Image (cartoon, grey):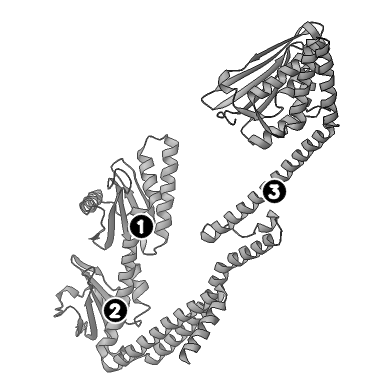
Amino acid sequence: MDELKEGHMLKMVNRMKIKHKLILIMLLLTGIVCAGFVVAMTLSFKTYDEMLYDHASRAMNLSVSGIENEIGNIEKLSVNMALDSRIQEQLINIRGVLSSYERVRRMTDFKSKVLQYMLTEKSISSIRFLNTEGYNFFVGQNNVTNDEKLVQDIVDKAHLREGAGVWIESGDDLISAREIRSIFDPILEPLGTLIFRVDYDGLVERHFRPTMNQSAQLFVISNSGVLYRPNGEAFKSFSIESVQFPEEQGFLLEKIEGKTYFLAYTRSSSTGWKYISLTPYDDIFQKKRAVRNTIITIVVIMVAVASVISYMFARTLTRPIVLLTNQMRNVEKGDWSVSTLETNSVPRMDEIGYLHKRFQNMVRNIEQLIDENYKKQIVIKDTEYRALQAQINPHFLYNTLSSINWMARSNNDEIISTMVESLSRIFRVSIDDKRTMVTIREELELIEGYMYIQKVRYADKIEFVVDVPEEVMASQIPKFTLQPIVENAIHHAVDQMIDVCRIAIKAEIDEENQELTFIISDTGPGMDMTFLEALRQFNVEAKGTGIGLKNIYDRLQIIYGERYHFEIESALSEGTSIRITIPKGEDSYV
């Protein structure tokens, strides 16, 4: 039966939302803390009733604990500052070769960082930094000390501690110092010394007064003398050092200026300081009930505040998770809109913020891939449509060309026979060959067949030159990359000239960048800048039914992405040149 109840309870917890789980856990922890606090205070009141001196000692121990904790916090603060990687980097950079402006800027940033640390502890009145490079400044209400000999003595003591903290009692001042040692290479190299001036009077007042009644007073004695003394006239002339304390902690009665005081004392195990509280003997039994009511009120307030904080914390922590879950549901339904993924809150830099960022990037990448694939399909469909338009009964064309070739050979007309064979080869590559990539050798053979036909037509008006290294002949390029450009040169250069037009195909290899560049040039009439800019933007309406430059550009972009270049250069009376740069490949691809 018990196992069934436990299993049912676990199922209930597992079904709860994360926000509710966090609230439940924090309330349980708060309840445990409050319950422990109430139990501890009940026991302390019971002991308070039984032993008078224990009341004062417990109150004083609470004060001492607060003081010691704050001293420990200052020690931890100095450790955090010494190990802060940003402070370390700033100090290392300041020591480097920097301009005066950069050095001042970095030093200002360093001072701001030191000030930020100082403001986290109320008891620190000022912080001073100095190093062997001559940097010396302080932040806070006033300088740590104007005695430079004392400062040097503090620096020497901190250096001997090799990065550990050191406490110095100088008159009424309490000073802490720590040498900053590098955590980067060179490791443990001294970077400077931090000196903290502690407002010990304010620290004691802040922790002692709330825990003791208003008539209680406190002495703090260090190894070098009285570190803290009450302000009353009766205590200024009283020599607390002359009182004999037989044990490390305890109590005794002492007459001061004719008035009996209850002295409870204890020695700190961490600092070695002795704390002595003085309470008028008649005030010990007062306000017990008020203290009890105050404690109950504090507990109730703590529970209420903890409940509100628990709810706000859980809501703040789980709200981005809920938002991310809703975004995933939207994407699951097909809503790819990036605008729905944006939030009005400040971007988070934690793990949840990282999940949001990566999820949004993933959605954008998927949208981009869908868009690119859609455009690619449009280009492929357009190419297939153009190919279908060109396939006007190909078998009829082949049979007709075969008959013409047979008749030419029967009449011993080699020129017509060669033209027909070249034309048949062009048709075969255009219509029957379904490959998208061909070798450079195959592309050039196709161009040479095409140019043979054109030379028969134009006779000596065309001079055709090919300069392509043999080592790249077996590499592959997209089919019909070069031939349409040569065809454009025939139509727009040769047809417009009376003199001989020179058409050249040249290939250049860039071994450093692993690129292959084709240069197709002609010595035709060229074009003006207005027409050239329009052509570069592909805003010129294509003439004829062939494959235009825009088609070549789109296919190269689909195949190579951003790894290609397509450039057009021309000038009136100077001809036209087109440069195509693509990645250089091996024998099977480019």
Mark 2, residue position: 61
The three-letter amino acid code for the residue at tag 2 is Asn
Q: Could you say which is closer to the camera, residue 108 or residue 450?
A: 450
Earlier in the chain: of badge 2 and badge 3, it is 2
Tell me the tag on residue 526.
Answer: none
The three-letter amino acid code for the residue at tag 1 is Asn
The three-letter amino acid code for the residue at tag 3 is Ile
The answer for how far apart the CA atoms under marks 1 and 2 are is 27 Å
Which of label 2 and label 3 is nearer to you? 3
Tell me the tag on residue 370.
Answer: 3
Q: Callout 2: few (<14), some (14-19), or many (20+) C-alpha neighbours within 10 Å?
A: many
Where is residue 242? Give x, y as percent.
Answer: 14, 75
Mark 1, residue position: 80
Q: Could you say which is closer to the camera, residue 529 or residue 422?
A: 422
Confirm whether residue 216 shows in the render.
no
Q: Are marks 2 and 3 in contact (CB under 8 Å)?
A: no
Q: Is residue 115 left or right of residue 588?
A: left
Where is residue 165? Give x, y as percent.
Answer: 26, 58
Vertical relation: 71 (above or below) 10: above
Element type where label 2 sits in the image: helix
Vertical relation: 382 (above or below) 349: above
Q: Could you say which is closer to the camera, residue 357 or residue 403?
A: 403
Could you tell me how many numbered marks the image carries?
Answer: 3
